[in-house]
Image (spheres, coloured by chain):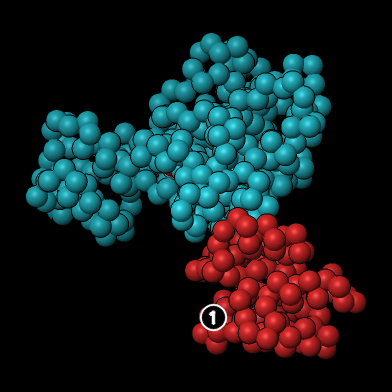
Amino acid sequence: MTELEFETLRVFLKARSGLALSPDKRYLVESRLASVCTRFKIESLSRLIWEIKSGRSQAVENATIEAMTTNETFFFRDKAPFDLFQDVLLPRFIKERAASRRLRIWCAAASTGQEPYSLAMLLKEASARMPGWQIDIVATDISNEVLEKARAGIYNQFEVQRGLPIRLLVKYFTQKGDQWQIASDIRSMVDFRYLNLIEDFGRLGPFDIVYCRNVLIYFDTQTKADVLRRIAQQMPPDGALVLGASETILGITDALTLDPSYRGLYGKSASVSGASRPALVGIR
Amino acid sequence: MMYCLIVDDSRTIRKVSREIVESLSFEVEEAENGEAGLSRCRARMPDVVLLDWNMPVMDGYSFLKELRRSPGGGMPKVVFCTTENDLDHITRALEAGADEYVMKPFDKAILAAKFQELGLLSESLSL
Ligand SMILES: C[S@@+](CC[C@H](N)C(=O)[O-])C[C@H]1O[C@@H](n2cnc3c(N)ncnc32)[C@H](O)[C@@H]1O
């Protein structure tokens, strides 16, 4: 791959997905895009980049973006964000939304579904405390491939063992040969949708709780700031945002404020709460 | 330092498990069947037991029932680690007092996640 080809790809990925490619990622690009070439019977990487540049095939472009995303995820990843959900956020919103009995949750980069399903299982466990509640879990991702797997809710033995407590496996999964499928009532709690975070997402409506974990790390600072600002706009004044373990808003945006009591938890900054009112009623 | 007892009749599995558990900063002892495991426990109760199911002399299931009946035997976390990978076995193990269940083959990521879930690893450890 020539310098120019790499640059073409870098500009394309940044513009279309927000993904920031640093020069040291060349080896990664080459290995990941080889499979796209094979799939579309494109004879070389140079030719693939030419195809992208010519804008002839949406399918090739999407496959290129998908190949460059990192989809690693697992059930109850890092544990703490889910303890936070169960012990802090859920009790808080059960109280604060007692009148409307409505809760809207968004997993903004859901990958193959383990994160939204982990939340759905926790909600199911708490359902006795939430009779008659209407709960929406919207789970989005830029990759249709991972969304398809997420909707099917079928995982291999390795995937169901990584982070998923055995009691929840027994309770919410059925075994199909060497695969495990999550129960249909858990699956039906999650609405999986295609969404590119760098594009407008105002139409999704407001969310009380947003999990946006391990995706901003792939964006440059400006893109991070833009996405975070727009996420804040989707949150009511008392909304909560949970980021990944290695992610921070420090020096990136002032639309959000770190909750000093809990690592990884952010609230909306008081100064910008008022400005984003329209998002609450879904108007942008 | 936390102490882990590995009860498995396969020397290879014990070796692999030991390497993983030691890398998670545990002190490790080994036993080759349930009976040997029980006498180890009587000498010193482990914080966690990694337990195979099928073993000669005394199998993992009988070991667990015995352990849970003996003084102080309710304390250790017990993680089954076995090729028995059907719901039936898992349910029986949980009913007998197992805390977690790992289906072979497994790797460090799985074991570390299970240990973290059982509160055996510090929260700050990002897996
Ligand atoms: C590492 S996974 C994170 C999964 C999960 N949130 C977790 O923390 O375990 C990152 C996901 O972000 C998605 N992604 C990358 N760029 C995106 C974009 N511009 N819009 C939406 N999703 C994106 C990828 O497809 C991938 O599935």
Instruction: Pinpoint residue A223: horizontal percent, then vertical percent.
Output: 43, 36
Vertical arrangement, residue A161 with respect to residue A206, above or below:
below
Instruction: Pinpoint residue A21: horizontal percent, then vertical percent.
Output: 33, 48
Q: Is residue A136 left or right of residue A67?
A: right
Task: Determine which quarter of the picture holds residue B62.
Answer: bottom right
Vertical arrangement, residue A191 with respect to residue A116, above or below:
above
Q: Is residue A125 left or right of residue A252?
A: right
Tag 1, which chain?
A: B
Q: Is residue A190 left or right of residue A263?
A: left
The residue at 71%/47% (across/down) is: A83
Q: Secondary structure at mark 1?
A: helix
Which tint is chain A?
cyan
Q: Amino acid at mark 1?
A: Ile
Vertical arrangement, residue A223 with respect to residue A244, above or below:
above
The residue at which mark 1 appears reads as B13
Which tint is chain B?
red
Q: Nearer the viewer, residue B11 or A23?
A: B11
Instruction: Pinpoint residue A168: horizontal percent, then vertical percent.
Output: 65, 49
Q: Nearer the viewer, residue A229 or A103?
A: A103
The residue at 40%/26% (across/down) is: A199
Task: Determine which quarter of the picture holds residue A282.
Answer: top right
The residue at 79%/88% (across/down) is: B39
Q: Is residue A227 visible?
A: no
Furthest residue toward right = B71
The residue at 43%/22% (across/down) is: A200
Indicate which quadrant contains ligand 1: top left
